[in-house]
Image (cartoon, grey):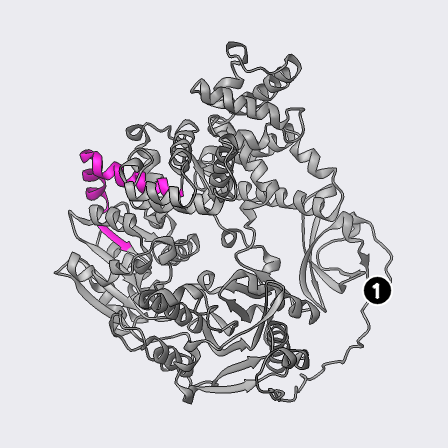
């Protein structure tokens, strides 16, 4: 524990050793801010500050987990587990569960994720017979979120005449009604959405003096990561919590403030000196991540922003290679350029697919990149796609679990009352909702007392509803005396869901069944590592999990495709930033104001600083949009990069002649690439598709360590066997493609006898 200070540079050490009073740490990209936060917490613990009195807030579960693991390595699990550390939403939900009675919520309230909120708003729009073109789901949900974060509630909305008039002009006169019904239905379902977790925490601290005093005394030392990304409500909560002791440490980089569309306020970090006049400030300017060429490139770009805290990021790393800026004929050419370059570098430098990332401004740009990578047989994964916890089969199981913990959860009940099929159709469900609303009761209260209400549902269907209610009651009766794994498995099997998925032998069905198994594996792990292993405890934060919190082993060694926003906080040896064109990056919205343009520039700064060794930037002269090729101008950001750091190249388009008939621009020259020198022992493969003749071996004959042959993947070695009987899986390392996990009953493997 004593030598941790020796691992810090002078500025890092000063920030870590600062104990009392407000502290702002401006941490440039790759400057080791996570290490500073981690070691500062360790330093506080070393000075006999109780872990129960330390609050550390992050923006991702991944960041919180990484910090906790590092602290555990130094001080041990017992002390580390006593820290209040996590995302804003997870920590605030924890506080709200403790103080739930003050806000008239049950302790086991449900957290509605974005999909739950959308489902509820969709139902309300349908119930009110409103035009979906005027009342677009995305617009409504974003507007409600924005209003909540500006403390405009559904109850006081009518006081804002300007907003009401805006609704009328936009042909959404019933927006207020939707907002009011949405809030009412959430309360009736004992549910909070993500915004409610923040707003209700603020109300708790603002309206209950005993609560604010309790948590001010408890959280004597507060540390906040990525402070530039905090919104107004988060800022107000932090300010209240820190008001008594003012032992607040914020770490951030104004140059990486890129979330204004989520309500983030760069002013929070820029005005820290005004909020805490006695503050101390340190700048972490040494970059440990990137080559000096990449660092200086990023500096030259961000220097064009006027509204910033001045700093000069530097590095002792090698100069490295120059930045490649490539002009491509079309987005298809751009995709081929990326795929070919990755292929060449992999062979020449003997690196792995996981070492590469392709970053873009919008998710729609991934198509041409994906097509090109598939043609080169380069494995890839997309971030920002469907999270593990958002997959239908997972949501279905979790809906049963949610209803078990909180029977008033209307969205969960609607989701599974007729899945698997019970003969309870949509018309019946609508009748239940209408009756519950007119009677001002939850749907659960209604279905458990059907005979007391005029619901106009026939006797046969009523009987099916009562059977469903009895099933859920049986789960509820076990929630306090069975662990999470046992109860979830029992729910999956007793509900018929398990069997329904098992009987689906299609590839999609098998995949869904495996996902359920993976969920149960996660529950088992939870039970083994938590003394409080009840289902309610597992369910508390499951709505806050993302796809990064459940990344599978087979996804580790793949090229990463993601938006620049999603790449924040990550790093890769080789980075491609594509689509650097005006009105794309920077986006069209950036033309509205200097403020928006500066945020787009900060976004590009984030993209550049993800790269460790090599950086490739590309733009096209033509891009396929709305069924046509449109002419594109290079991004203004490319001209803001110091030319001494770049090499400019051009790629000839396969469709260039066709384009030239439609557009007047100069013909590009074909890019010359270095000759690939294959590694020693490298054998050239025929272009014909590989195939293997196999004789399928018995499942139980396959054991760890043996060689096997697969019809598609070729020869591999079994490195792990999991599961039993029909659920038995093998993790196999194949010579041609790397590691795969296969369900043995479908894999058709042949044992190779030596």
Dominant secondary structure of the residues highlighted in magenta in the image: helix
The region drawn magenta spans: 194-223
Residue 623 is drawn in which quadrant?
Answer: bottom right
Q: Is residue 495 visible?
A: yes
Q: Is residue 219 left or right of residue 493?
A: left
- In the rendered image, residue 31 lying in the magenta stretch gets the answer no
Q: Is residue 90 visible?
A: no
Q: Position of residue 269 (x, y in %)?
A: 25, 61
Residue 636 against residue 390 in the figure, above or below: below
Q: Is residue 584 left or right of residue 502?
A: left
Q: Which quarter of the figure is the C terminus placed in?
A: bottom right
Instruction: State the SS at label 1.
Output: loop
CA neighbours of label 1 inside 10 A, class few (<14), some (14 to 19), many (20+): few
Q: Residue furthest front?
A: 169
Q: Which residue is mark 1?
A: 692
Q: Position of residue 292 (x, y in %)?
A: 39, 82
Residue 159 against residue 79 in the figure, above or below: above
Residue 144 is drawn in which quadrant?
Answer: top left
- In the rendered image, residue 209 lying in the magenta stretch gets the answer yes
Of residues 599 and 398, the one nearer the viewer is: 599
The residue lying at 58 percent from left, 74 percent from top is 622
Q: Residue furthest top?
A: 452
Q: Position of residue 284 (x, y in %)?
A: 28, 71
Residue 604 against residue 241 in the figure, above or below: below
Q: Which quarter of the figure is the N terminus placed in?
A: bottom left
Of residues 230 and 632, the one nearer the viewer is: 632
């Amino acid at each position: 524990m004593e030598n941790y200070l020796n691992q810090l540079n002078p500025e890092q050490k000063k920030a870590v050793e600062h104990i009392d009073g407000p502290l702002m740490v401006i941490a440039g990209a790759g400057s080791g801010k996570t290490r500073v936060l981690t070691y500062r917490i360790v330093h506080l613990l070393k000075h006999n500050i109780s872990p129960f009195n330390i609050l550390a807030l992050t923006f991702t579960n991944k960041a919180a987990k990484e910090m906790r693991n590092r602290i555990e390595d130094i001080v041990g699990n017992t002390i580390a587990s006593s820290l209040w550390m996590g995302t804003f939403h997870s920590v605030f939900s924890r506080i709200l569960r403790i103080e739930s009675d003050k806000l008239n919520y049950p302790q086991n309230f449900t957290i509605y994720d974005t999909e739950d909120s959308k489902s509820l708003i969709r139902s309300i729009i349908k119930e009110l017979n409103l035009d979906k073109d005027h009342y677009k789901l995305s617009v409504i949900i974003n507007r409600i979120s924005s209003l909540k974060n500006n403390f405009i509630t559904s109850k006081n909305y009518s006081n804002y005449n300007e907003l009401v008039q805006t609704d009328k002009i936009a042909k959404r006169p019933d927006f207020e009604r939707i907002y009011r019904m949405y809030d009412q239905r959430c309360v009736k379902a004992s549910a909070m959405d993500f915004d409610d977790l923040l707003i209700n925490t603020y109300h708790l601290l603002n309206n209950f003096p005993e609560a604010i005093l309790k948590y001010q005394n408890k959280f004597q030392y507060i540390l906040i990561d990525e402070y530039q990304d905090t919104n107004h409500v988060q800022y107000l909560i932090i300010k209240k919590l820190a008001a008594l002791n003012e032992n607040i440490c914020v770490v951030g980089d104004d140059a990486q403030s890129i979330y204004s569309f989520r309500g983030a306020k760069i002013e929070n970090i820029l005005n820290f000196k005004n909020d805490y006049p006695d503050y101390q400030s340190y700048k972490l300017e040494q970059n440990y991540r990137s080559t000096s060429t990449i660092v200086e490139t990023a500096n030259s770009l961000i220097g064009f922003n006027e509204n910033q805290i001045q700093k000069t990021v530097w590095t002792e790393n090698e100069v490295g290679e120059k930045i490649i800026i490539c002009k491509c004929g079309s987005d298809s050419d751009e995709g081929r350029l990326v795929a070919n370059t990755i292929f060449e570098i992999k062979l020449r430098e003997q690196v792995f697919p996981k070492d590469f990332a392709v970053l873009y401004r919008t998710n729609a740009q991934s198509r041409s990149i994906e097509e090109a990578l598939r043609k080169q047989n380069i494995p890839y994964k997309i971030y920002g796609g469907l999270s593990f916890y958002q997959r239908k089969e997972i949501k279905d199981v979790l809906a049963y679990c949610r209803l078990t913990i909180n029977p008033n959860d209307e969205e969960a009940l609607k989701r599974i009352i007729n899945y698997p099929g019970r003969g309870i159709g949509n018309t019946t469900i609508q009748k239940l909702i209408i009756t519950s609303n007119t009677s001002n009761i939850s749907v659960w209260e209604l279905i458990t007392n059907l005979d007391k209400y005029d619901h106009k549902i026939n006797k046969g269907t009523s009987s099916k509803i009562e059977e469903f209610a009895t099933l859920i009651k049986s789960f509820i009766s076990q929630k306090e005396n069975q662990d999470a794994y046992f109860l979830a498995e029992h729910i999956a099997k007793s509900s018929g869901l398990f069997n329904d998925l098992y009987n689906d032998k299609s590839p999609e069905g098998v995949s869904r069944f495996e996902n359920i198994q993976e969920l149960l594996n996660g529950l088992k792990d939870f039970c083994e590592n938590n003394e409080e292993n009840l289902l309610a405890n597992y369910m508390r934060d499951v709505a806050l999990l993302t796809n990064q919190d459940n990344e599978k082993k087979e996804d580790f060694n793949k090229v990463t495709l993601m938006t620049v926003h999603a790449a924040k906080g990550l790093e890769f040896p080789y980075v491609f930033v594509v689509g650097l064109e005006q009105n794309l990056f920077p986006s069209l919205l950036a033309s509205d104001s200097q403020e928006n343009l500066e945020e787009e520039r900060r976004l590009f700064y984030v993209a550049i600083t993800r790269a460790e060794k090599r950086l490739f930037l590309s733009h096209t002269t033509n891009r396929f949009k709305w069924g046509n090729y449109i002419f594109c101008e290079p991004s203004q950001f490319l001209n803001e990069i110091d030319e001494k750091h770049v090499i400019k190249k051009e790629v000839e388009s396969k469709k260039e002649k066709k384009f030239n008939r439609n557009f007047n621009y100069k013909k590009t020259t074909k890019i010359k690439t270095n000759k690939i020198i294959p590694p020693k022992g490298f054998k050239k493969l025929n272009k014909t598709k590989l195939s293997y003749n196999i004789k399928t071996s018995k499942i139980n004959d396959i054991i760890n360590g043996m060689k096997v042959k697969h019809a598609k993947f070729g020869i591999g070695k079994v490195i792990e066997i999991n599961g039993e009987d029909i659920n038995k899986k093998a993790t196999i390392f194949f010579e041609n493609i790397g590691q795969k996990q296969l369900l043995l009953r479908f894999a058709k493997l042949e044992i190779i006898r030596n």
